[in-house]
Image (cartoon, rainbow, N blue to C red):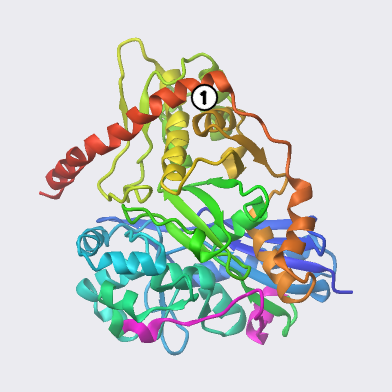
Amino acid sequence: MRDVLIGIDAGTSVIKSVAFETAGRQIAAAALPNKYETLPGGGAEQDLARTWADTATTLRQLADKVPDLASRVIAIAVTGQGDGTWLIDADGEPVAKGWLWLDARAASVVEEIRARPEDRLRFEKTGSGLAACQQGSQFAFIKRNMPGMLTSAATAFHCKDWLYFRLTGERATDPSEGTFTFGDFRTRDYSDDVLDVLGVGDLRHLLPDIVDGTRQSAALSKAAADVTGLLAGTPVVLAYVDVVCTALGAGLFDRQRKPGCTIIGSTGMHMRLAETPDEVQLNDAATGYTMAMPAPGVFAQLQSNMAATLNIDWVLGLASGILASQGISRSNGEMIALVDQWIASSQPASLIYQPYVSEAGERGPFVDANARAGFVGISSRHGYADMVRAVFEGLAFAARDCYAAMGPLPKEIRLTGGAARSPALRKILGATVGAGIRTSEREEAGAAGAAMIAAVCVGQYASMDDCIAEWVTPLLGAAEPSDQKLAAIYEAMAPSYTLAHEALRPVWRSMAASRAR
């Protein structure tokens, strides 16, 4: 009896394979840490062969947890980290290691292209601002500086596309990544105008076909079946990019309430739903993303701040590092357990923290590869607890900044990601944005979103709306209302947060120039 759907989510931190019942209940999951390396000059790369091997391992591990898994699987769906450039040759072998969304080497190319008047045409077609993490800007950089990489390349993938290729032998990408990078979001297809603005029209042959996973699937190849332990011929679905899948699993697709959706992971993603192309609101700064959702005519409009939990890891790492120097060992979990205590002992909005701790700078709601984190307003009375609180508030102000760039602030936010488990973060975020916060009992929203696309594809549901009614809505918790007293404090501080990052941009540029000498 076939009664299991598998969702694969190959993220930046972890690669997961998750088994679900047809009605959405999670059965089991298997995961391995993801591996990538950072390079001088802002590079961030990942080995393609290892990524596939680790993914196959998680599928075998899943089979150890689910009896008779191979014979029970209805379909497999794969999603993964977005952006980046993963090149393969005509034989399907990697040309080089995959460039990740964390890669900042194309920053100067982005500044140059964004300064041209014609970039507005590219923005209005894609609905997406240009950043160093994207394949378009990475194409332009590689073409100028590493043309040999392109000589033997036959196809350019993103992470999930590479895994789909290894599972099926098919070269394809999905409507979300295909169009926000190189296309027209209204047509869900590539645009020659966009390629020309980027200066990469001659690389059009590297772009794979765009396939919609809600309607198309391919068969698991014999080679992939031998490696994964699953049955050859099992339908495999190329899901949308991980951000879309996570938003789908977390509850963004709610036509009635139109909530915001925030993912607090390594990066911060903040989304609103647009049910038609005309509802997409493009800003004057030409930032953010417009991503096709797995339903006709529906889009997720998104602003993303580059670093979210990376800031929390950094500030907690300061304390654990000091303790370690004195021979005292504290795990990350032990440090996180102290966060609520530190926040309770500190005053709200006594400092401003700008959460631009990523080496790649910032991409939303403004693009600046030179942006760096910092505190504003420190005096001798401030201590470590104040710094911890300010970091959490900085993440919340960054979210507010992103939502404000897309229109009115939402009245409700569906929150997901590892940090969503923090009561302190939920309270601060709700007060900063002025929204009720709802979280889902769904443990693996990204893998669930991928599996939902497969469920529609194979006919388990007539539409995505029907699937959501069973997979998502019952798992949403009650809304935690915004703390009105705290909200008033943060409302007064919000203009200062924005003024601070606007004022510091020349300073960041000057510092970057000094480092380059």
Q: Residue furthest top?
A: 381
Residue visible at 85% across and 65% down in the picture: 67
Residue visible at 52% across and 83% down in the picture: 171
Front residue of 312 and 83: 83
Front residue of 283 and 442: 283
Q: From the top left corner, tell me how far across and down residue 189 is, in percent.
A: 47, 78
Residue visible at 30% across and 14% down in the picture: 379
Q: Is residue 373 magenta?
A: no
Q: From the top left corner, tell me how far across and down residue 112 is, in percent.
A: 19, 62
**Which quarter of the rendering shows the N terminus?**
bottom right
Q: Which residue position holds label 1?
A: 487
Badge 1 element:
helix
Q: Quadrant of residue 435?
A: top right
Q: Is residue 215 magenta?
A: yes
Q: Is residue 84 visible?
A: no
Residue visible at 32% across and 36% down in the picture: 373
* Magenta part of the chain: 203-229
Front residue of 502 and 92: 502
Q: Quadrant of residue 453?
A: bottom right
Q: Residue furthest front?
A: 278
